[in-house]
Amino acid sequence: MARRGTDPRPRQRGRARLALPGLTLLLGLGLAACGGGKEVAIQNAEEGDALVQLEGTRVDLALDFQPGVSNGLYKGAVRLFGPDQPEAGSLLAVNAVCSLENTPGWPPYDNLYGRTIKEPAEARDLSGQSNWQILYYFDGEVEARGTIEPQPWAQRLKDNLCRRGDFDDSTAREDPTT
């Protein structure tokens, strides 16, 4: 029988037991840092929350979106993480103009547009200075111009900002006729 301290097996087992909780903690912190949580609807989001998590891409809120006129003109900033993005992500100033389907005088599409920025505060001064635009027609057609091609994350962001799809909270609103 080996004397205590000369048999390496008990020490290795002890280390393995200690390493597992440490590994679990590191994995949990890594997932939290990478937005391992759920998507947050824009009306409940705070800076740093994931607005979109889809197909290896995450879009975090970088600057609160300011609601505008009645058709849902929203102006804010997001940080885009994912394939072909720098490790720190790319900052985008984003405007969303949400339309009303089948309503005379309203365009038949939702409009998402913006530009790349260096600091979130630059989003406040977008004032029509965009280098990309994506129109999401209600009949399913998508039209894009500029530096960002239509991608699943952009449509999901539009859905979040315009409260469409599973972000739709219209049933949670009070009925104004009562």
Image (cartoon, rainbow, N blue to C red):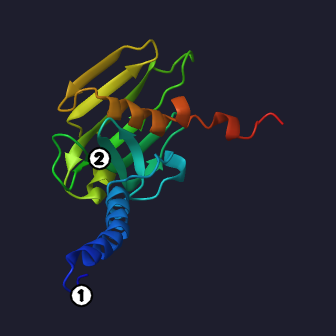
Numbered circles on residues, count: 2
Tell me if residue 164 can be seen: no
**Secondary structure of residue under mark 1:** loop
**Residue at x 29%, y 46% (from the top left corner):** 93
Q: Nearer the viewer, mark 2 or mark 1?
A: 1
Q: x, y percentage for residue 100?
A: 54, 24
- Report the amino acid beneath label 1: Arg
**Secondary structure of residue under mark 2:** strand
Mark identifier at residue 3: 1
Give neighbour class at mark 1: few <14, some 14-19, many 20+ (Cα, 10 Å): few
* Most foreground residue, 15 or 146: 15
* Most foreground residue, 17 or 177: 17
Which residue, given by chain and number where applicable, does mark 2 sit on?
93
Q: Is residue 141 above or below residue 23?
A: above
**Residue at x 51%, y 40% (from the top left corner):** 69
The quadrant of the image that shows the N terminus is: bottom left
Of the two numbered discs 2 and 1 on the same chain, state the one appearing first in sequence.
Answer: 1
Q: Is residue 79 above or below residue 138?
A: below
Q: Quadrant of residue 152?
A: top left
Q: Is residue 98 above or below residue 126?
A: above
The answer to whether 170 appears left or right of 17 in the picture is right
Kindly report the distance in space between the C-alpha atoms of the residues bearing marks 2 and 1.
67 Å
- Report the amino acid beneath label 2: Ala
Tell me if residue 95 can be seen: yes
Residue at the right extreme of this rendering: 178
The quadrant of the image that shows the C terminus is: top right
Q: x, y percentage for residue 118?
A: 19, 55
